[in-house]
Each structure stands twice: as structure tokens, then as C-alpha cells.
Amino acid sequence: MSTTTPEAPATVGDSRVNPVKAMLKSDRPYTVFAALIVLVVFFSVLSPVFFSAANFANIGRQTTLVTIMAVGMTFVIISAEIDLSVASILKLSGVCAALFMQNFGENWVLGAVVGLAVGTFIGLINGLLTTRLGIPSFLVTLGMLGVAKGLAFVITDTAPVLIDNTAFFKVFYEGTILGLPIPIIWTAAVLTIGGVLLHFTTFGRKVYATGGNAVAARYSGINTSRVKIYCFMLSGLLAGVASLIFAAQAHAARPDFADGLELDVIAAVILGGTSLFGGRGTIIGTFIGSLIIGVLNNGLVIIGVSSSWQIAVKGLIIILAVAFSARKR
């Protein structure tokens, strides 16, 4: 029986590194892209309204929240963990930012910082409970989903927190740069920073090593607990960013928004080729997965499919994607 020797991972300073290949390296990037094209063609045939510049721009805006949170989720899942609390973090971060702006002179900059800090702190708690107490992240973040959601309802008395700050709206939703809507700029910035961090830094290599083989990573000197904590903190931070964009869009922070959004986020990551078992995944794959979810959501609405069936379809997609990932393991 023949054996093969695994190829040594290239380092950041290695001349063999091809940035394009590194960003595209995945088990099925072209398959996922082909699936996206098939979906676009399918919905375009069923509805002429779908294939229009206005609708594509609408899809871009609709996928902003999912894409931004999916970048953080990619780090968490590659490290062989999962974060079910991102949608609830979005709720709590948003209402904390809005309440701060209401009570402290509409200072939107500090309000935004508060929202980001809340998200990052919850991510820190998730990471500490998972690594220090050895509780599975599925259970930790499932519990945090309820805690953060409940706190968001309690501190707002279940009512939306209105925001009235033109500068805040322009920075996070209503403004444009070079003709592009601000939400798309935020999405591009997060994708770029996340891609560089994951694929071209020492931390990114540690994330892959931690998820691929935690024991071997520890023997090589990697503090796997710290790596996982940072991944959870990044996930919480980006959920905070998403909360600010939504609050600017709605002119309010709503504790009743985003129920089930974590399903779309996880689906985008898994569809993009990230292994639910850790150790594999790319940011560009996650982006394509997010576009698939956006096209699917938009197309199903346009052709009149009920919201209940939309949830069922996305659940089925996750099952198929995980099954494919397990087969490739």
C-alpha cells in the first residue's frame, strides 16, 4: 500500500505562495460558484424581475449582514468550534449602541464603540467558557443565544430603540463612496481584512492548525485555547458591526430582529467549503456561499415561496453541505 507525505504548509514569507491560489484554495470553490450561476439562471427563467440591476443591488444590500457575520463564523468553524449566538449578539449590540446614543447626547461614535465592545465581550465570554471550562461551544453559544436575546428584550422593554442621527445613518447605511452604497463598502472591507488575516498571517495559520489537529498544534507550541478565544471575539465583533449597519438601515435597534439569522450565516460558511469539522475553509468561499443564500432568499420571495418553506430549504441545504463535507473529510 502506497503512502503519501502531506505537503508542508507554505509560510507568509515563502516565495511559493501565490496569493490568488491561496485565496481560492478550497475543496469545491468552482462547484460553489457554478451552483451560484445555476441559481441565478433558474430564478431568471422563472421571473424576469429577478434578472435586473436593481434586484442584484438589492441582493447585495440584503446579504451584507450575513456576509459580515459569516466572515467571523468562518474563523470559528475552521478552529473546530461553532457560534450559534451571533444573531442574538447582533440584537444586544445594536440596542446597547442605540441606548447609549439616546442617553448621551447622540454621540454616535461612542455609541458605535459601545456596540462593538458589547459584541466582542460576549465573544470573549463564549471563548472562555468553551476553552477554560471545556463546555462544547454548541452548548455555550446555544445558551448565550438565549441570554443575549433575553437581555436585549429586558433593557428595551421589548420596544425598538429609535435613532435620530444623520451622520450615523450615512456612515453605516445611507452614504456612498465612488457611487457604491456604504453597506457594500463595509462588506468589501470586512472580506478583505478577514481574507488577509486568515490566509496571510501567522494567526491564520494557527487557526487552521488548531482546527485541523489541536493536539499536534499544541505540541508545536500553539496556544489553541487562545486562538479559539480570539476567533470567538472576532465573531462577536463582526456581529457588532452588522448590528450597526442594521440599526442605520432601520433608524432603530430592534430586539425582535434577526431570529434565525444564524442559520443563514452558518449555511453560507458551510456552503462556501468550510468544513464543519475544522481545519478547512476560505473567506472567498464564504462570500460565494453568502451570495448563494442571498440569491436563494431573494429568488424564493420573488416566485412566491412561503417563509416556512424558505427555512426548510435552507435547513436541507445545510444538511447536504455538511454531508458532503463529512464525505470529503
Image (cartoon, rainbow, N blue to C red):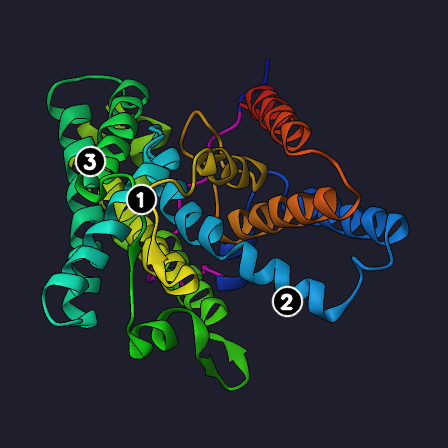
Q: Nearer the viewer, residue 295 or 47?
A: 47
Q: Name the residue under label 3.
A: 154
How many residues crowd around disc 1 within 10 Å: few (fewer than 14), some, or many (20 or more)?
many
Q: Name which quarter of the figure residue 154 lies in.
A: top left
**Residue 75 among magenta residues:** no
Q: Earlier in the sequence, mark 3 or mark 1?
A: 1
In this orientation, does residue 81 appear?
Answer: yes
Foreground disc of the pair 3, 1: 3
The residue that appears at 71% across and 44% down in the rendered structure is: 301
Q: Which type of secondary structure does the marked residue at label 2 adopt? A: helix
Which stretch did the figure color magenta?
Answer: 4-18
* Label 2 with label 1: CB-CB less than 8 Å: no
Q: Tell me if residue 200 can be seen.
A: no
Residue pictured at 38% horizontal, 61% vertical: 245
Against 134, residue 243 (above or below) is below
Task: Residue 231: give x, y in percent of width and height.
Answer: 27, 42
- Label 2 belongs to which residue? 57
**Is the Cβ of the residue at disc 3 closer than 8 Å to that at disc 1?**
no
Q: What residue type is labelled 1?
A: Lys
Q: Mark 1 points at which residue?
A: 91
Residue placed most toward the observer, 76 or 57: 57
Helix, strand or loop for disc 3:
helix
In terms of image quadrants, where is residue 112? bottom left
Distance between mark 3 and mark 1 Cα atoms = 12 Å
Give the CA distance from mark 2 to mark 3. Answer: 36 Å
Q: Does the magenta stretch include residue 16?
A: yes
Q: Which residue lies furthest to the right in this view?
A: 45
**SS of the residue under disc 1:** helix
The answer to whether residue 126 is left or right of residue 329 is left
How far apart in space, not on screen, are marks 2 and 1 (Cα)? 25 Å
Which marked residue is nearer to the observer: mark 2 or mark 1? 1
